Image (tube, coloured by chain):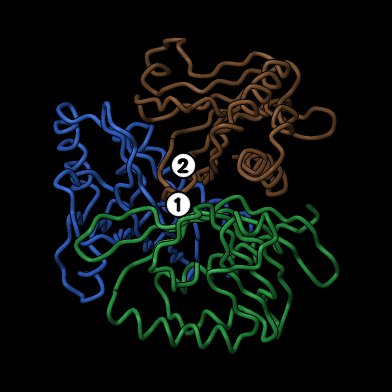
Chain colours: A blue, B green, C brown
Amino acid sequence: MGLSPELRIEVQDLMTEYCHVLDDGDLSEWPMLFTEDCFYQLIPRENAEQDLPLATIRCESRGMLMDRVMAIRDTFMFEPRYLRHITSGLRVTAESADVISAQSSYAVFETLPDEYTRVFNVGRYFDEIVRDEGRLRFRRRSCVFDSELVPNSIVYPI
Amino acid sequence: MGLSPELRIEVQDLMTEYCHVLDDGDLSEWPMLFTEDCFYQLIPRENAEQDLPLATIRCESRGMLMDRVMAIRDTFMFEPRYLRHITSGLRVTAESADVISAQSSYAVFETLPDEYTRVFNVGRYFDEIVRDEGRLRFRRRSCVFDSELVPNSIVYPI
Amino acid sequence: MGLSPELRIEVQDLMTEYCHVLDDGDLSEWPMLFTEDCFYQLIPRENAEQDLPLATIRCESRGMLMDRVMAIRDTFMFEPRYLRHITSGLRVTAESADVISAQSSYAVFETLPDEYTRVFNVGRYFDEIVRDEGRLRFRRRSCVFDSELVPNSIVYPI
């Protein structure tokens, strides 16, 4: 609402880049999509709606995101898999001079070796986006997923 | 085709708002996305293609949409679930001075308590959109779904 | 990246048209979305990443795409099914005066008669798009899918 088509495309490009680094790209680029002083969490909808702070993943700085990347690399050597993010419904809910607030829905599919692809996780992103060093970055991304059932395997950011 | 980027975004925003009220928002806002004199149906593709009028849901005014919302609220008290809409492929097929005709594809995922998320319903929206009281609204939304198999539970609009 | 909003919409419209002819439209229009001298392949990610040329489908001209359409029509008389493409994450990775390179992610759902809809195939499109006879067309579309497991039924283009 009020975003120019060009700025909206820039926001969309950030969302796309995010999915790209997780699904096909270099995971070490993932922390660079956040500001240095950032907040990222992956939390069940049940907990988010009851304001329970119990998150599946919770990182409070880019450094913590980098630690997560290292941990994943160790895990994925033993448990290779492919993820595939599909997103839709970008909704810009507020915008100040400095911060763009956005929401969007996502579905992530998982493919394990010698298995058929399955639905892995669906939910909604709640974002605060800022311009930082000349590009858009997430200052905050809260990833709220619909299923209360958490696969053991969910060490990977969504 | 001929829509300005700005108007296209406005159409996209209506689609997004629709998904938002069904998945995360206040369901009572759903009827307000339609004109007062409107048509909404949820119909299997098989029936739509053979011009059979047998629809799973069929509402012929905003009042009937409101009745549906009341019925769902009673039902969902007993059967809580989360829905998640993902859409893509917005296609503007015709446009007059007053009416925008549009199509898009959707996939809806369902999450029941203590179960994994599953594919619930996929299909295609066929829409007629008009400007009404200063905003875009659906004058007609026909929701044609691919599976001939109808879950008992499909009392909810898609 | 440098594409005007209008050109980006034109690229998006080509993607949408592609999904439309496969899911709902006239399959014989599918080859016309490619240039006459074109390349289309459907290949498992495993093979693509190891540079193995073993593709599930491989067509090196519009004529070969037309042959594929004929073959599918014969097959689908016996095995009717509905496909539903959902795409997201359009990413323009390079652009010269003549060629637009693009990537996007897709999920395809399959519905067989008297069965529930299921996830059929997910993956990523790698495209080269050119202007040809006044419209955008694929000069190359490489469709790289995540699951190493190939259903027998995958004679259909994705």
| Residue A69 visible, this orientation | yes
Q: Amino acid at mark 1?
A: Thr
Residue B153: which quarter of the image? bottom left
Among the 4 quarters of the image, the one containing residue B41:
bottom right
For this rendering, which residue is in front, A36 or B72?
A: B72
Q: CA distance from mark 1 to mark 2?
A: 11 Å
Q: Quadrant of the N terminus of chain C?
A: top right
Number of numbered labels in the structure image: 2
User: Closer to us: mark 1 or mark 2?
Assistant: 2
Residue B41 versus residue B84 in the image, above or below: below
Q: Amino acid at mark 2?
A: Ala
Q: How far across and down, in percent of the image, does residue A13 sit?
A: 51, 47
What SS does tag 1 mark?
Answer: strand
In this rendering, the answer to whether C26 lies above or below B132 is: above
Name the mark on residue A87: 1
Which residue shows up at 43% across the image and 66% down it? A101
| Left or right, C137 with reference to B55 | right
- Residue A88 against residue A95 in the figure, above or below: above
Label 2 marks a residue whose chain is C
In percent of width and height, residue B27 lies at 45, 80
What's the residue at 40%, 52% (across, down)?
A: A137
Label placed on residue C107:
2
Q: Position of residue B55 (x, y in %)?
A: 58, 68
